[in-house]
Amino acid sequence: MKPLCRAFRSMTIRAKFARVLRGVHVKRAAATLATVLCATALLNAPLMRDAQAAGDNPPTATDTRPAIVIRGEYLARAGDCVACHTAPRGKMFGGGLAMETPFGTLYSPNISPDVQYGIGTWSADAFFNMMRTGKSPDGKLIYPAMPIAAYTKVTREDSDAIFAYLKSVPPVHQPNRPQDLRFPFNHRDLLLGWRSLYFREGEFKPNPAQSAEWNRGAYLVEGLGHCSMCHTKINMLGGSSRDKQFAGGLIPVQNWYAPSLTSDKDGGLGDWSIKDIVDLLQAGISDRGAVYGPMAEVTYHSLQYLSDADVKAMAVYLKTLPDNDPGRKSGPTARTDTPVFAAGARIYADKCASCHGAKGEGQPQHYPPLAGNQSIEMDSAVNPIRIVLNGGFPPGTRRNPEPYGMPPFAQELNDVDAAAVVTYIRTAWGNHGLPVTAKQVNELRNAPLH
Ligand code: HEC
Ligand code: HEC
Ligand code: HEC
């Protein structure tokens, strides 16, 4: 079972990755530079690697490294540095991950301690200055594909620990690939405009009215975790307004919807318990749903390694996020007496009920419930459509090392049938999602290859 499971996992993931790249070529000709940069920023969907591959240190019996290095490794995981700074099958922190945009390709740089090509000559001051101000030691402005708007909140102490860790890993003697953005997007000076609108330099300020736990969670979510990079809607200037923070948004280019994390009872976490949130983030599965798409990679590379206390602190903070964006609440359910609903019900009974239950109750935690599952009822239907077409596996995590998967239905179901079954799960059992059309399915199926 194990090798089979692993093979299928990497197959699915490979397919997913190909699809991400395919999605990249969506024409967004009208988009501004900033949008591109932000889209790029969000493109942090590197290939998930098998546990042995670069990026995962096998646990050693006794860790003899200095405490600051161990702490730095932990914090680097909280920041998910490895996901962007390691190319698929590349050496850890050697950079070279291609982040494609319609305007060219950005490559993540080498941040290993190599003296010639990495950050081997940087001082802790220079590194901290980069984290805080988003500028390289030579004064070069860093593209926001690096989550500088979040990392600026990191404390000096934590920055020093991350730096000590980065200095301790094996140097990778591999030159950086030059950024390949087309004119005029290759001009870093244009970033001055973006920065004046959307970059607020400064360390995280604890809120004295809140508990230490809440403040720890806020620090991790807003800072190293850079959660708002995906979970906030991006405007045409590649920025987002403060009151829309964490209210959810479609990830440009990648075409996945990152749901609201506010207390919104519709798409948000208002109904989730702390335990549900902790399970989802850390194990990748929960009584409410499982992670997939780009979120599976966040859990895989980053969140599964965080301590129980830190993940709980994040959940405590998330539970207090205000809902500033009411949107469509638990409105009336769509009509369920249509032929499409009936067709969907038949397909569901035939192909889905064995895992997700006759009434959508699921078999928690391995097979997520679909009844009352906000992430499939949201206005945006891209997630349920894509998971039905592509299937998926939650990531293998320490708490869930052998995840159960969902088979892809892209071959078995044509656009009309896939739309019917997605319409069914969005509207059955009192779910209040809206119906989807065959065209919506087709658009996600047929994203152009190149
Ligand atoms: C979402 C992807 C992403 C994540 C996560 C990320 N980086 Fe980056 N980083 C980039 C990209 C892309 C650049 C290059 C930007 C540019 O060319 O202006 C970069 C640039 C850098 C640089 C500047 C290197 C140089 O030679 O100028 C350093 C240092 C760095 N990152 C460290 C980190 C650390 C430490 C973390 C984790 C705490 C991290 N990065 C997380 C994408 C990312
Ligand atoms: C073999 C068991 C199995 C079958 C059959 C199956 N699924 Fe799934 N489904 C899963 C698993 C496991 C996940 C979690 C996948 C992940 O996290 O990548 C899942 C996830 C989902 C999700 C996302 C749930 C969430 O939390 O957001 C939806 C929607 C879904 N399935 C719909 C369907 C539909 C519709 C069918 C039939 C066409 C179907 N599934 C058939 C096992 C199955
Ligand atoms: C690379 C983009 C990305 C980043 C970064 C990211 N997320 Fe997500 N997240 C998503 C997407 C896409 C989904 C929807 C798919 C799913 O449910 O797994 C999601 C789903 C979730 C969900 C489930 C919500 C629901 O209603 O089902 C939670 C909770 C969550 N993310 C929390 C976080 C936290 C906390 C962080 C920061 C540590 C974070 N995310 C960082 C993209 C991202």
Image (cartoon, rainbow, N blue to C red):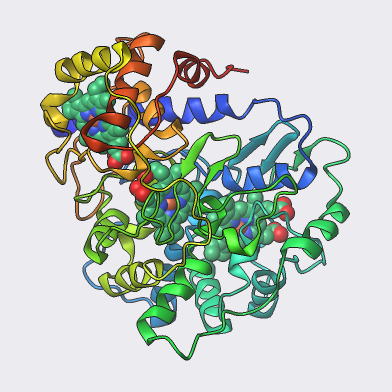
Q: How many marks?
A: 0
Quarter of the image containing the N terminus?
top left
Please say if 300 is above or below 342.
below
Is 226 placed left or right of 137 in the picture?
Answer: left
Q: Position of residue 421 (x, y in %)?
A: 29, 20
- 24 sits left or right of 355 in the view: right
Q: Where, quadrant-wise, is the C terminus in this rendering?
A: top right
Q: Residue at horizontal 25%, vertical 43%?
A: 372
- Identify which residue, 22 or 412, lies in the foreground: 412
Looking at the image, residue 270 sits to the left or right of residue 286; the answer is right
- Residue 193 position within the rendered picture, expressed as x and y whole percent measured from the top left: 84, 58
Q: Residue at x 42, y 68 (%)?
A: 73
Residue placed at 56% from the left, 24% from the top? Answer: 22
Determine whether, in the image, residue 60 is placed left or right of residue 242: left
Residue 171 visible here: no
| Image height of 413 relative to 86, above or below | above
Q: Please provide percent x and percent y for residue 440.
A: 49, 20
Q: Nearer the viewer, residue 128 or 147?
A: 147
Residue 423 in view here: yes
Viewer-side residue, 55 vs 27:
27
Give residue 420's quadrant in the image.
Answer: top left
Q: Which quadrant of the structure image shows residue 220?
A: bottom left
Q: Quadrant of residue 212?
A: bottom left
Residue 308: give x, y in percent of width and height.
26, 70
On the rendering, which quadrant does ligand 2 occupy? top left
Image position of 402 with respect to 111: above or below: above
